[in-house]
Amino acid sequence: MKKCSFLMLAIATLLASCSQNELQSTVNDNEGLKPVTISVAMPTEGMTTRATNAYGDEEVTRCLIQILDENSQPLEGYETPEEMDGTEAGGFTTTATLSLDGRYSILFWADGGEDYYVADDLTAVSMADGLATPGIAYAASVAWGGAQAPAAVEADLRHVVSKITLRSTTVVSNGKKLSLHVPTTYSGYDVLAEEPFAETTNGSTCSKTLQAAVPANSDVFSFYVLADGEENQTLILSNDGAETKIENVPVKPDTHIILQGDVEGAGYTQVTFTTNIESEWGNTETIRENQTAQVSYHIGDMKDLFSLVDITVTYTDENGDTQTETVTSLPWSKELPTVEVPFNPSMTIYYKMKEGVEFNKAEYGLQRSYSINVDTEATVLNNESVDFYDLFAADAAKGYIEQLEEKPDEISCEIKNSKE
């Protein structure tokens, strides 16, 4: 009995010396299971902010994981993809318990959310209904399994879309109706096969009516497409209905294509576009920090309009709060103290027809002129100015003001830390 008691005491002492984690590890090893830490990094090195968005890219709001067995069937608990924890800037993580006897394919998909993609199965991700072109998207596939399989999996996501940017060497006029057509594109992507599927019937077209003039040597617009890159394509640029062919464009995944030329004259004069390819989207760029900007808001002359309406303006101050002012004279401006980047200035102009106003003139000159002025070395995106003027008969002028009351003028831009 004494020997038995001593033996039981020794076992109890041994067990007490083991941590709970060691016990769980022993249990897992005995069952042939292994806890695996899984992490995903966006395609940048040393990223401290969203480097992809220094290009004006859409924000990633979710990263999904789906684990398949050796027969490419979803593992129990992964019949539909699971959302990982984390953010675009910091990466995404999760944990899984996998069998040492198994062989797995671990699939990853990151995008801007369900408004852009239906991702109920990562072998058959599809564009959301109603979209003319897809949103930003990344993917990766990692094989795991065997007794020597690591306890941690690290995956580097890559773009599955091609980004196409139209850049003009000349000023592009306000009001231009532009479109760029890519004839061969797809509406779905298979992460396991690492290829797009479901070819679209008529390709993909990005259309834009300019609300303000675009300066020379500036980007007019950008968009994404799902493409296989097997053959170069001939893209069609439409400029107010006049078409220009841009030939031999290598539209393929994980590529940023910049089409540069005289957008203003395209279709009306002989224009040649150059195609520049960036195979790395910010993979080696360093994002500058601690940048600042000088921001001011401006409302210019309104001609007869100012005598017919009362004007209230709201704007984003240096702290990111919304401030409101009544405009009593023109021109009106508001200069902010130096702001830290990133910063998103915005301004809204509200119009209300003056009490008792009478439209007794034959015609009225109505002008709307406003802008956000930014002075910085940082990257400024989507900054547009508006300068509209036209003559209206009395009835038309009243109707025009009523429309302004229902839909105030809004203007905004994004200021981001630039790349070195």
Image: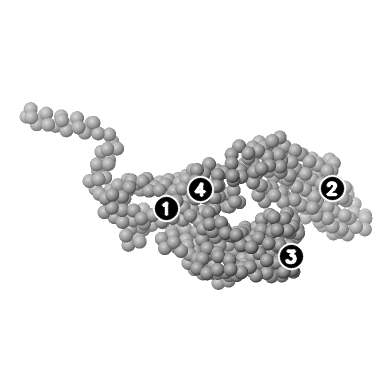
Viewer can see residue 172: yes
Amino acid at circle 1: Ile
Q: CA distance from mark 2 to mark 4?
A: 46 Å
Name the residue tied to disc 4: 44
Query: Decide: marks 3, 1 in contact (CB < 8 A)?
Result: no
3 vs 1, front mark: 3
Image coords of residue 61 (percent x, y): 52, 49
| Label 3 secondary element | loop
Which residue is painted at 11% across and 29% down in the image? 5
Relative horizontal placement of residue 175, taking residue 237 as reference (left or right): right
Q: Residues within 10 Å of mark 2 (few under 14, many from 20)?
A: some
The circle drawn on residue 265 is 3
Amino acid at circle 2: Asp
Image coords of residue 373 (percent x, y): 73, 44
1 vs 4, front mark: 4
Q: CA distance from mark 3 to mark 1?
A: 47 Å
Which residue is painted at 74% across and 57% down in the image? 171
Which residue is painted at 23% across and 31% down in the image? 16
